[in-house]
Image: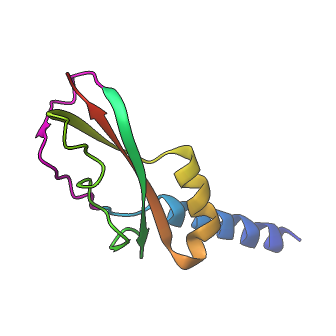
Amino acid sequence: MTEMKRLVSLILLLAVTLSVAGCFTIRVGGKAELAPSTEEGTKVAHKRCWYALWGLVPIGDNSTDSLIPETVKKVRVETKYTVPDFLINIFTFILTIETFTVEIYEVK
């Protein structure tokens, strides 16, 4: 019985490890100027980016171009690995799909 527990523990550890490991690329663009991370702003958009093969291959658009409104002059971009991203990755680790959240803030 202890062999079975060890195997289950190993599989769970592997699943968690694979669900948080990855290397991601977010292409930051748009016509607005990028503000320093110290400047406060109002959140205007967010997006969840999906990746295959632990972040090596983006599935869909991983750019911020469509998120930044034309009227905004200055933005701050944050990338986050949130709790929902972690939970999604636990359930999709077999397919090696990773998620990442991008948030855009308008800085005045």
Q: In the image shown, does 88 or 72 lie closer to the viewer?
A: 72
Q: Quadrant of the N terminus?
A: bottom right
Position above or below: 20 against 69: below
State how the image is colored.
rainbow
Q: Position of residue 46 (x, y in %)?
A: 40, 45
Query: At 80% across and 67% down in the image, what residue appears?
Result: 5
Q: Quick check: 97 left or right of 5?
A: left
Residue at 33%, 73% (x, y): give it.
Answer: 56
Look at the image and tell me in which quarter the C terminus lies: top left
Give percent across and percent down for residue 102.
36, 48
Q: Magenta segment: does it hold 43? A: no
Q: Is residue 23 above or below residue 44?
A: below
Overall secondary structure of the magenta section: loop
* Closer to us: 67 or 79: 67
Q: Look at the image and say whether residue 39 sits in the magenta stretch.
A: yes
Tell me which residue sits at (19%, 43%) in the image. Answer: 70
Which residue is nearer to you in this view: 54 or 34?
34
Check the image and report above or below for 22 versus 56.
above
Q: Residue at x 56, y 62 (%)?
A: 89
Extent of the magenta region: 25-41
Give x and y (percent) for residue 100. Answer: 42, 55
In the displayed structure, 88 sits above or below 94; it is above
Tell which residue pokes out farthest to the right in this image. Answer: 1
In the picture, residue 73 is in which quadrant?
top left
